[in-house]
Amino acid sequence: MEYKRYVDYKDLLPEERKFVKRVGWRSLINFLDPTILLKKGFCIKDKYLFNFGLGYTMAPFGDFIDEHFWLKTPNLKTHFYLRQYQNKNNWFPALGVDFTDVSLFKNFTSTIALHGWSQPKDFSFTQSEGLLGVHSTFYVNIDFR
């Protein structure tokens, strides 16, 4: 049997066309990302560097939009994000924060991160029930110089 599904847009079902249009429009969010033009960010009082970014991409069960914020001070490098996952009709929130190059002792720094999210049960495109997830990371960097 010849396989010829999803070759042309006209082959899609009306509900599938709706999703393709959603993906197409949301992909334009990536062009609104100020980090494309302002790589270094915004200086605040000559000691603080702030930047933010927007993004859109696909997920195994649908797609997501996220907002990223970075703050760099003389003693702190941090990144915070908010994320909104969506399957067919339901939204699932996520957020995370990480601190980079945190000084522990002389020649020892670390990266600490914490992430939390909700996702549709069984990664289903149609599921409305969400499951919670959490992940943490701790890295230690040693400078032997």
Image: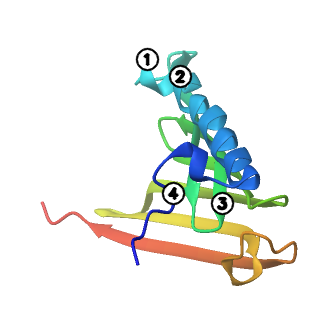
Label placed on residue 62: 3
SS label for mark 3? strand
Q: Earlier in the sequence, mark 2 or mark 3?
A: 2
The residue tagged 1 is 37
Q: Which amino acid lies under the numbered mark 1 shown in the image of this protein?
A: Leu
Instruction: Specify the label residue 34 is tagged with.
Output: 2
- Mark 4–mark 2 Cα distance, whole angstroms, equals 35 Å
| Disc 1 + disc 3, Cβ < 8 Å | no
Determine the residue positioned at 72% across, 69% down.
125
Local SS, label 1: loop
Q: Amino acid at mark 4?
A: Tyr
x and y percentages locating residue 145 in the rendered image: 12, 60
Residue 139 lies in what quarter of the image?
Answer: bottom left
The CA span between labels 1 and 4 is 36 Å
3 or 4: tag closer to the N-terminus: 4
Q: Amino acid at mark 3?
A: Gly
Q: CA distance from mark 2 to mark 3?
A: 25 Å
> Mark 4 or 2, which is nearer the eye?
4
* Front label number (2 vs 3): 3
Nearer the camera: disc 1 or disc 4: 4
